[in-house]
Image (spheres, grey):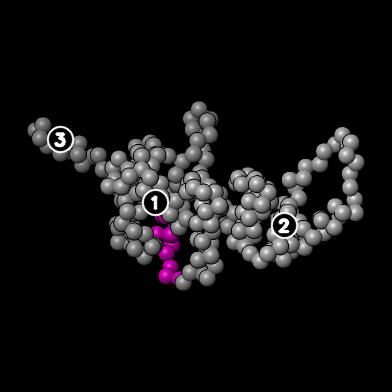
Amino acid sequence: MPKYQSFESILDNQVMIPKKLLCDYIKLGLKETELMVLIQIHRFRTEGNLFPTPDDLADHLSISGQECSQVLRRLIQKQMLTIEQKHNEDQVLNECYSLEPLWEKLYTYTPVQKPKTQEFNENIFPLFEQEFGRPLSPFEIETINIWLDEDQQSPALIKAALREAVLMSKLNFKYIDRILREWKRKGVQTVEQAREQGKQFRQGQTTRKEPASSSKKRDISLYYNWLEEDL
């Protein structure tokens, strides 16, 4: 009798994985390692850990924590995984992984061809990593996806905002976000429009100078040293 009870406890300790995921993950453009990372995230969620670290995941995989971080970045880039912020029982704001994009793609998948802009979108991430001199964090990748998907910012303007931040020596995501929001407020939709805005600002600066003794200092970070070369 104890033997059967032991088997029952084994069967009770199971994680449900959709058969469709195991059959169709290749159609979604997932590799086996990426699939296993997603499955491990799913398992951690069932155990109450909504934001396992790369090392937590790597403990149950055949890859290192650093390699796991790279896989997580790719999954967020592919929009199979997102990072959300939720309040726990104590009303403390915590980050957590959401597999909702994966399930949505899995059950609404249609074999449509990627638009040409998709490749350009994916090339943005290596460009950011090159300029920052380090791999992007999952949260930073999610921020770029928000610019692309929710804010509907064009890849060209995101690229321009990144280079503007480099020129201004203010290479951080808050500053880049501020640039993009300012452009959107002014109705800037193309790099050409952005360049024209810069010319108008520079012309205004040459004809109107503030007194050096002015007690009120303007926030010059709202104005940008626009790029002159093509992006």
- Residue 46: give x, y in percent of width and height: 35, 40
186 relative to 96 in the view: left or right: right
The amino acid marked with disc number 2 is Trp
Q: CA distance from mark 2 to mark 1?
A: 35 Å
Q: Is residue 154 visible?
A: no
108 relative to 91 in the view: left or right: left
Q: CA distance from mark 3 to mark 1?
A: 36 Å
Mark toward the start of the polypeptide (2 vs 3): 3
Secondary-structure class at tag 2: loop
User: For this rendering, which residue is in front, 9 or 37?
Assistant: 37
Residue placed at 81% from the left, 41% from the top? 218
- Residue 92: give x, y in percent of width and height: 52, 30
Secondary-structure class at tag 1: helix
The amino acid marked with disc number 3 is Ser
The mark lying in front, picked from 2 and 3, is 2
- Residue 109: give x, y in percent of width and height: 42, 64
Q: Is residue 110 visible?
A: yes
The residue indicated by pointer 1 is: 71
Residue placed at 36% from the left, 48% from the top? 67
The residue indicated by pointer 2 is: 226
Q: Is residue 107 magenta?
A: yes
> Which quadrant of the figure contains the N terminus?
top left
The residue indicated by pointer 3 is: 6
- Residue 177: give x, y in percent of width and height: 64, 49
Residue placed at 76% from the left, 50% from the top? 223
Which segment did they paint magenta?
99-112
Verify CB contact (< 8 Å) between mark 2 and mark 3. no
**Is residue 39 placed above or below 152 in the rendered structure?**
above
Q: Is residue 62 magenta?
A: no
The mark lying in front, picked from 3 and 1, is 1
